Image: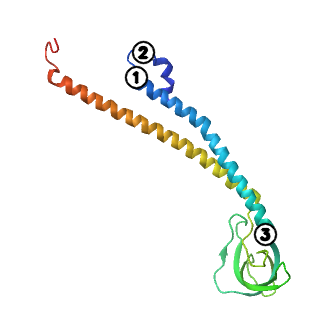
């Protein structure tokens, strides 16, 4: 930023080296690219993620069914943590042997995870199945999909800004290395006569 602010003030200064101007113009160019390209990249990435995730939401809700299951018995094992995206604090899930009716009308039975604190035989709970009646995960919610899309867009914008800034730093590093090489060469030429009276006369 100091290079950018001094670009106009020092452009005609005799002490301003060509490399100083080049670094300032490079910093200005990088800033413009970040300001313009990073939001664009974030918008494109976020929009693409939103379309893909919302399409997945529609497909999952179309393919899965919410059915009522009945607890046959509780299975051994410690309680499981609830899904952090769909539950509130204090929710506990337990593994049970349950029976339910598939969308085609057939009765199914098997081990599932129930959102019951103390499941007892005969207790009823709601669970998700696929179109064939097999237990399935809860479908993704539209709001959750949107949140993921926003995070994807934000990450893409940050990645773009980081790449531009990294490229700028790499170019500046190479310019500084070339400057040091030229200085070393100049000192090698001036070294034998440095400090001598009348040197170069």
Q: Residues within 10 Å of mark 2 (few under 14, many from 20)?
A: few
Picture coordinates of residue 177, whole percent (x, y): 34, 35
Q: Quote the CA–CA distance across marks 2 and 1.
A: 11 Å
Q: Callout 3: helix, strand or loop?
A: helix
Nearer to me, 113 or 19: 19
Residue found 63% across the figure and 47% down from its top: 154
Q: Of the residues tagged 2 and 1, which is closer to the observer?
A: 1
Where on the picture, by quarter, is residue 34?
Answer: top right
The residue under label 2 is 13
Give the class, few, some or many, for how many residues have Cα within 10 Å of label 3's Cα (few <14, many ≥20): some
Identify residue for label 3: 63
The reply, left or right, for residue 131 in relation to residue 4 is right
Q: Please give the name of the residue rendered at 81% of the width and 73% of the height, measured from the top-left corner.
A: 66
Q: CA distance from mark 1 to mark 3?
A: 65 Å
Q: Position of residue 130 (x, y in %)?
A: 77, 74
Residues under numbered marks 2 and 1 in contact, where contact means CB atoms less than 8 Å apart? no
- Whether residue 97 is visible to the viewer of this picture, yes or no, is no
User: Cβ–Cβ below 8 Å for labels 1 and 3?
Assistant: no
Using the numbered discs, state the Cα–Cα distance from disc 3 to disc 2 in whole angstroms: 71 Å
Locate residue 11 relative to residue 126 in the image: left or right: left
What is the x, y in percent for residue 140?
A: 73, 63
Q: Residue at x 33, y 30 (%)?
A: 179
Extreme residue toward the right, this view: 105
Question: Which callout, 3 or 2, points to the residue nearer the camera?
Answer: 3
Quadrant containing the C terminus in the rendered view: top left
Left or right, 118 with reference to 170: right
* Residue underneath mark 1: 18
Would you place residue 95 above or below residue 87 in this image? Answer: below
Q: Secondary structure at mark 1?
A: helix
Spot occupied by residue 65 in the image (x, y as percentages of width and height): 81, 72
């Amino acid at each position: 930023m100091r290079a950018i602010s001094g670009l106009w003030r020092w452009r005609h200064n005799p002490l301003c080296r060509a490399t100083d101007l080049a670094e300032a113009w490079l910093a200005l160019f990088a800033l413009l690219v970040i300001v313009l390209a990073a939001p664009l990249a974030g918008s494109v990435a976020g929009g693409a993620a939103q379309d893909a995730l919302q399409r997945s939401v529609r497909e999952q809700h179309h393919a899965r069914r919410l059915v009522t299951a009945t607890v046959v018995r509780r299975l051994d094992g410690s309680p499981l943590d609830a899904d952090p995206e769909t539950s509130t604090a204090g929710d506990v899930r337990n593994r049970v042997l349950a029976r339910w009716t598939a969308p085609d009308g057939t009765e199914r039975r098997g081990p599932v995870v129930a959102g019951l604190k103390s499941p007892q035989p005969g207790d009823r709970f709601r669970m998700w199945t696929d179109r064939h009646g097999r237990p399935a995960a809860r479908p993704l919610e539209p709001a959750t999909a949107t949140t993921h899309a926003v995070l994807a867009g934000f990450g893409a914008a940050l990645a773009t800004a980081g790449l531009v800034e990294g490229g700028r730093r790499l170019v500046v590093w190479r310019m500084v290395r070339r400057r040091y090489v030229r200085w070393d060469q100049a000192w090698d030429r001036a070294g034998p006569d440095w400090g001598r009276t009348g040197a170069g006369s």
